[in-house]
Image: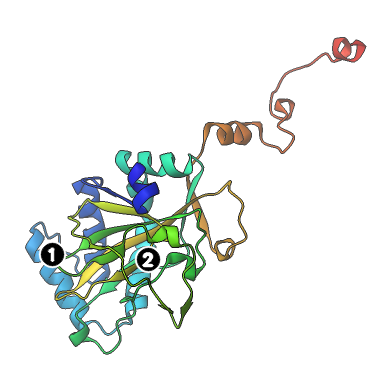
Amino acid sequence: MNSFAEKGYVIVKNAIRKSIINNLQSTILENCGNSLKINNAKKKYEFFSNYTLNNRKSEFDFCKSIYESFLYKNLIDEILLEKKIFNVLTNILGNDLSFDCENSNLALNVPLKKTKKNYFFKNWHQEIWSGSSPSSVQLWTPIFQKNNIKGQIELIEESHKWGHVPHSNRKPITLPSKYKSKKLHLNYGDIIIFSTLLMHRSVETDNPRLALTEIVKNFKWKNDTYENNKNWKIFSYSEITKIERFLGNHYLSPFRILDIKTDFSGILKK
């Protein structure tokens, strides 16, 4: 956990079970029009790659329909509740957790030579530029990729300590002359959890790649950021919040829900 405070991120290896990855990939292939069950990993990727390279939908619309299927099947909840991931999230944010379920939190990157405009290919940026709170965290994990050598994301370590970097037209106006960057090489099941202040960018890929991104926040922490204009799905409650929900009203009175006959005479005499 010291890594998150010092470097601005935590990488969790083997955090997502293979069965969940398979469900994610099968859901994607279903949205690509494949009704057959493909078990071979190489053939799965080949089908996904061929479809995305010839897909006539916009990248945004393509990802939106897939993400909606993920939500319908509660696959995002399953990922966030994975033991290793949940432990990191609760250590950073506490147990009152929700995720952004409004946006299409999938990033499709195809080779730049194959498209005139890659919607999800982004230069150096911070998530707070898009309205995320500094108190939230960003998650990123690959779902479909040919390999993990080229084409994921690059980050600047400790850039979360810079605060809000001035920017224009979705690019930083200036960066320090010296900084240390790191390119990710995550396998299926690995995930990075990082600060919304951490500077990062897309790395050009030779083959189509699809990744899941997600913003998670503590819904009890009040803020005045653009996040208030989004929809959030709660997937974890703290013990205190569970008690509040059990009592059922803002006065936290148990007498509203207990079906008992109470004699208040002794209390009134006191």
Residue at the (31%, 65%) spot, across then down: 179
- The residue at which mark 1 appears reads as 149
Question: Residue 208 or 161: which is nearer the viewer?
Answer: 161
Count all numbered tags in the image, as a single digit.
2
Looking at the image, which residue is at 43% across and 40% down? 90
Give the image quarter of residue 63: bottom left
The image quadrant that residue 121 belongs to is bottom left
Give the position of the C terminus as an image quadrant.
Answer: top right
Q: Residue at x 43, y 57 (%)?
A: 161
In which quarter of the view is residue 109 placed? bottom left
Q: Position of residue 137 (x, y in %)?
A: 43, 54
Secondary structure beneath dot 2 equals loop
Residue 140 seen from this side: yes
Of badges 2 and 1, nearer the viewer stands: 2
SS assignment at label 1: loop
Measured from the top left, where is residue 87 in percent x and y? 36, 38
Residue type (three-letter) at the residue carrying disc 2: Met
Upstream in sequence: badge 2 or badge 1: 1
User: Which of the labelled discs sits on residue 199, or is there none?
Assistant: 2
